[in-house]
Amino acid sequence: MDTPDGSQLQTFPRRLLAHRQTRPTRPAYREKYLGIWQTWNWSEVNAEVRAMACGLASIGFKRGMNLAIIGDNRPRLYWAMLAAQSLGGVPVPLYQDAPAADMAYVLNDAEVAFAVVEDQEQVDKLLELKALCPRVAHIAFEDERGMRHYTQSGLVSLAQLATLGRAYDQANPGFFEAQVEAGLGSDPAIILYTSGTTGKPKGVVQSHTSLIAAGTGGVGFDKLTDREDILSYLPMAWVGDCLFSLAQAMVAGFTVNCPESGDTVLTDLREIGPTYYFAPPRVFENMLTTVMIRMEDAGAIKRRMFHYFMDVARRCGADILDGKPVAAGDRLKYAIGKLLVYGPLRNVLGMSRIRVAYTAGAAIGPDLFRFYRSIGVNLKQLYGSTETCAYVCLQPDGNIKFDSVGVAAPGVEVKLADNGEVLVRSKATMDGYFKRPDATAEVIDANGYFHTGDAGIFDADGHLKIIDRAADVGKMNGGAIFAPNYIENKLKFFPYIKEAVAFGNARDRVCAFINIDMEAVGNWAERRNISYSGYTDLAAHPQAYELIRDCIEKVNADLASEAMMGDTQIHRFLILHKELDPDDDELTRTRKVRRKFIAEKYAVLIDALYSDKASQYISTQVKFEDGRTGVVSADLRIVDAKTFPSMERAA
């Protein structure tokens, strides 16, 4: 049992032992393998973690060491985290799709000697890095396919490691319990590396106390129980997955479900029917894109019915969800729409059972937010960062604002600096950056406030609105505030636009780069018998330009109606000849735009946008998944977009 001050449950391994006592037969983890869901209860998970921890100890892993975790979301990789923590070690999850060179930096910076990985692909990456990362001496792998003829020293399967662990446990009775008992809440629980938008990634050290504080606050805020089901499919190296799939799961004791693969996530989502769901805006955008594509291919009657009831939903759906008064006629229409449209749609999306859904990681467009809430999905926003365990602001049920990230979460102090920067203080704030006291001192002041780097404002009800990254907010020559992320999110609401990069700081007007969404625009083109050979060809097609111009002009009309934003309408744009890609260093692994890098790499295109040119030739080197490089060249068209009189000028 927990003591009043929570001292007995101050670490995750202690909470793991407590779940075995209080809910031994409740499902703790599920994984879909070869089309069949496998389930482990809390008692079985305890046995697996114990064997893995003792196995690690048998090959030399000790308190204070760091353990790299690389792979897709797999129960045994989560158990490896808990096993390392049980021994007083620290898991360091890496992005599984990162190229070997990017992994080398993190492995060396975190001084990693032991790694637990998913499969042959990740083993090959680490073996390739032997010369660059000589400290990595032990690699344990889960999937044994393709590993039969690997004879390098230090390689061991997780099955073999567990066998070693059970023998070690038997030979050293009481060892595991003593190691767990020695753990303190102040011990480091995990090191998460930042996405590195402005430089090399930094290792954020979060203690058990900080993660449990964030997990406990979120569980209490949304009244989560051990009966929740979540789907864990986002990168384990991302703080969002750490909060939901580790911290909150270990606090509440609910079930973590891992999909079979990245390609089957939507199918697995429908099968599990989670009650609690988390996804970045891009996932919700992709789902909506898929819906819109299907509706365009549907018959005329279905299309008319869909659009009619979606108009009803936009008018009153969110108010009904929030329990606000709605006219009887609209309630009746909404009830019919729920039967014919909203219910089946939520079922197709795998959202029939969702009680609470969250999005974070980037700003979400109000229209996208309104769509999901209007069909009855309790989608809310949270705000946080890696340094705050993704725990700063939450949106309370019944008090949702589309343009805010909510109010300060329980136990969190939020205030604004004189320049509008958001400052945060709470138990969930990091201990510091790994081996970087200088960088830590730059972001945590003498009063313990973490400087987020985000610019925000509070409204009259105490809701926080994030404008943009403070470093990205600029001014146009005419004096208007330029917030590129705000504009880009409006553009990305359209299913045809996958990425956008806006320019305007210290300029007379705003211009933009656009990446088309290949699936959505490809489907649109096929229905119009437009032939194309690939992304570059489709992106350059005149009709694709007209499609994107229409989207931009709708955004311009929207911006014109907003106070302070009318002068930031987009005057000229081009569609890039290649998709922005993390492998080409244009995006972070969490798909955040690296603005400075893009501005330098595509300086010739930016100059052309701000000239009278109607086109610009460019040749760009790209990296392929297998490590090869190539060149993509194109003569890009530059097109003007219609702008509208702003509200301020009209007034």
Image (cartoon, rainbow, N blue to C red):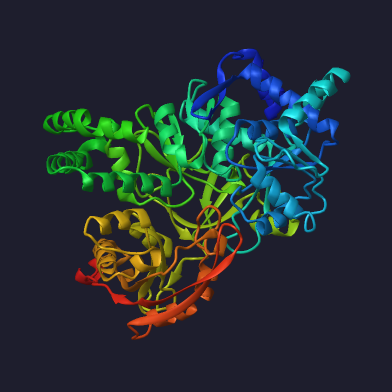
Foreground pick, 490 / 396: 490
Q: Which residue: 86% across, 36% down? A: 60
Rendering quarter of residue 533: bottom left
Residue at far bottom of view? 612
Rendering quarter of residue 65: top right
Residue 489, percent from left and from top: 38, 57
Q: Which residue: 65% across, 13% down? A: 21
Q: Mark yes or no: residue 169 visible.
A: yes
- Measured along the vertical axis of the image, is residue 4 above or below residue 262? above
Residue 437, percent from left and from top: 75, 55
Foreground pick, 401 / 251: 251
- Measured along the vertical axis of the image, is residue 439 above or below residue 642? above
Q: Which residue: 39% across, 30% down? A: 354
Q: Which quadrant is the N terminus positioned in?
A: top right
Residue 468, percent from left and from top: 46, 59
Q: Mark yes or no: residue 435 visible.
A: no
Foreground pick, 99 / 369: 99
Tell whether 628 sits left or right of 606: right
Tell whether 12 sits left or right of 593: right
Residue at far front of view? 149
Tell me how many marks there are: 0
Residue 278, percent from left and from top: 46, 38
Q: Which quadrant is the C terminus positioned in?
A: bottom left
Residue at far right of view? 171
